[in-house]
Amino acid sequence: MAVTTRLTWNEEKSLQKLLGSVSLTLLYKSSVHGRCTSEMLDRCSNQGSTITVIYCPKDIVGIFILGHYPIMSEKFEKSNSSFYFSLKNNETEIKTAFLNTTLTITQKELTACHPDFQDVFSLIPNNSTVYLHSSLVNELGVKFRSSRYSECEVFRVEGIKGGNGYISRITGAAQRRHELLADLRTYKPSEDLVSEIRILLLGPVGSGKSSFFNSVKSVFQGHVTRQAAVGFDSTSITELYRIYSVKDGKDGESLRFKLCDSMGLDEKEGAGLHLDDICHILKGCIANRYHFNPQQPITSRHPCFIVSPSLQDRIHCVAYVLDSSSISTLSSKMVEKLKQVQKEVLNCGIQQVALLTNVTNYQEVLEDDFLNMNKSVTSGSKIMEVQKMLHIPTSNILMVENYASELELDPLKDILILSALRQILRATDDYLEDLPLEETDEVVGMSQLRTCD
């Protein structure tokens, strides 16, 4: 009878993605092969890189070991590049901690030591106990230092690319992604003037506007999703004005921002989004699901026209979405149309950013610490082209790689998407802080009236 893992399909996929799309082969299962160190060693030694998964009452914790399990010895001095992880039961969000530790294995336990912390991690198979140092408890977000476990499994990791730098990079990516998600989940608009902000996506047909919304939603859902229809031909597939909310998980609350998707810009007359419609969108006069007509812009008589929009109905930031592979080949007519749109945006005093999609070298765009974007020669030249064309500050020209045909999330893509979104929200806060006093006074006055009612 085949021995099977206790990991769910989602949990196993999450661990595989964390390690760079590897495959896992189950070597040892304590409930089947025995709860003793020697049995674990017999099955796991000389197997290459391994990942040990420990099932505690409320958490799953574990250790990845790059290279072979340590040999049975009283003292194993060789430093081994390992990282530690936690995975909540029934969730796929992994927290990691990267420590360059020294591993020791005896008849009693597997121990990981760090010069600063002494024993960081101990696995004692004979009495099914795992111990974590307080520093590891904090980083992994678990609620115990010592716990009995119900199961321990060890997997051989096949397809690992190897190298300490690679392991440090992928665990750094996981940590950076987690930090960005936490930041965006707690975001609240500045000045308390609105409860949520609206971001309008504008750009040529096929530039990736709808795909950007799908990508943002995918990151927060934890899997690739395609709510907004995406087209690849020369005419816009988006004909409705859509105001999309983004939920934090399937059943989570809506986050404090909305992405507004519109018809694509077209250089031909009578095609694509009409300039007059853009003006009404910016002012908050067009309702969700309005059907665009390129030949006839909306009027105040239309049932989807909002006559007296509030500050919350307005657009608070415009993101020009441009395909980085075609910036150099944009026609003079399209560039002129973009500048006409930009004039309307500037007249409304709205913040603006540029999103460069289809950044195929996105793995080279990120620095090792993931704190700043490393403008490679190729990406840097694209940024300067957009800066020269639209006169947007380079700090507001952002690179993303949308999810198109992929089936699984990629932490590096997620970092670019989340970093771009965070910069958009910061630009939006600048807009709210810079509103004229008469507008903020009006909002405060209306709020006070509602309180009196």
Image: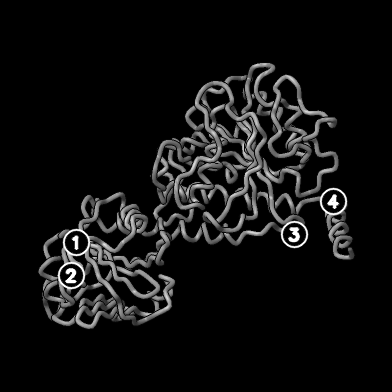
Picture coordinates of residue 170, whole percent (x, y): 35, 55
How far apart marks 3 and 1 lie (CA) works out to 58 Å
> Within 10 Å of the Cα at label 1, are there few (<14), some (14-19), or many (20+) other Cα atoms?
few
Amino acid type at mark 2: Val
- Distance from disc 3 to disc 2, alpha carbons, whole Å, reads 59 Å
* Residue placed under numbered mark 1 in the picture: 3
Point 28% across, 67% down: residue: 53
Alpha carbon separation for disc pair 4 and 1: 67 Å
Mark 2 or mark 1: name the one nearer the start of the chain: 1
Residue bearing mark 2: 32
Residue type of the residue flagged with mark 3: Glu
The circle on residue 399 is none
Residue 302 shows up from this direction:
yes
**Sooner in the amino-acid sequence: mark 3 or mark 1:** 1
Left or right of 125 in this view: 139: right
Task: Mark 4 or mark 1: name the one nearer the start of the chain.
Answer: 1
In the structure shown, which secondary structural element does the residue marked by tag 3 occupy? helix
Residue 407 percent across, percent down from the top left: 39, 42
Which label sits on residue 439? Answer: 4
Q: Are marks 2 and 1 in contact (CB under 8 Å)?
A: yes
Q: Residues within 10 Å of mark 4 (few under 14, many from 20)?
A: few
Q: Nearer the viewer, mark 3 or mark 2?
A: 2
Q: From the top left corner, tell me how far across and down residue 62 is, in percent.
A: 30, 68
Q: CA distance from mark 4 to mark 3?
A: 12 Å
Q: Give the distance between the C-alpha atoms of the residues marked 4 and 2, in whole angstroms.
A: 69 Å
Question: Looking at the image, which is closer to me, 311 or 300?
Answer: 300
Give neighbour class at mark 2: few <14, some 14-19, many 20+ (Cα, 10 Å).
few
Residue at screen point 66% across, 19% down: 271
Marks 3 and 1: which is nearer the front?
1
Which sits earlier in the primary sequence, circle 3 or circle 2?
Answer: 2
Q: Earlier in the sequence, mark 4 or mark 3?
A: 3
